[in-house]
Image (cartoon, helix red, strand yellow):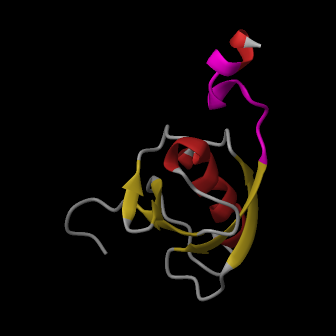
Amino acid sequence: MTEQIQRGVEDRAPELVPLNAIFATDFVQILVPVTTASTMNEVAAAVAHHVEGKRVRALPFPKFVIHNGRHLPGEMTVAEAGIAPLDHIAVEYDLPEGQS
């Protein structure tokens, strides 16, 4: 029992987290399934997969996730970010200075 109490959230099996997402300049919000163990880089790729090159022109730049106004680090997991099921996120291109 003590061992179970000492184990943290990171020891739990990944759980499904459906997210409402919008990608860059897209006009359609989509529902994207990720897990609590997914990193922000993986979340950004999952969202981009449904939109990039279809409704939004693909650009050769990295992508990042915004949740509640916070630019989240790429290696942060959904659980670490505190993102809950059906939360809204945005995925944007990390454009070099001076490009838009």
* Residue 81 vertical position relative to residue 20 in the rendered view, above or below: above
Q: Nearer the viewer, residue 37 or 22?
A: 37
Identity of the residue drawn at 54% across and 51% down: 82
* Residue 80 vertical position relative to residue 72 in the rendered view, above or below: above
Identify the magenta region: 5-15
Q: Position of residue 98 (x, y in %)?
A: 20, 68
Report if residue 43 lies within the magenta region.
Answer: no
Q: Residue furthest front?
A: 1
Report if residue 13 lies within the magenta region.
Answer: yes
Q: Position of residue 77 (x, y in %)?
A: 57, 41
* Residue 66 vertical position relative to residue 72 in the rendered view, above or below: below
25 sits left or right of 17 in the view = left
15 sits left or right of 44 in the view = right
Q: Quadrant location of the C terminus?
A: bottom left
Q: Position of residue 81 (x, y in %)?
A: 50, 48
Q: Nearer the viewer, residue 7 or 55?
A: 7
Identity of the residue drawn at 62% across and 71% down: 21
Identity of the residue drawn at 34% across and 62% down: 95
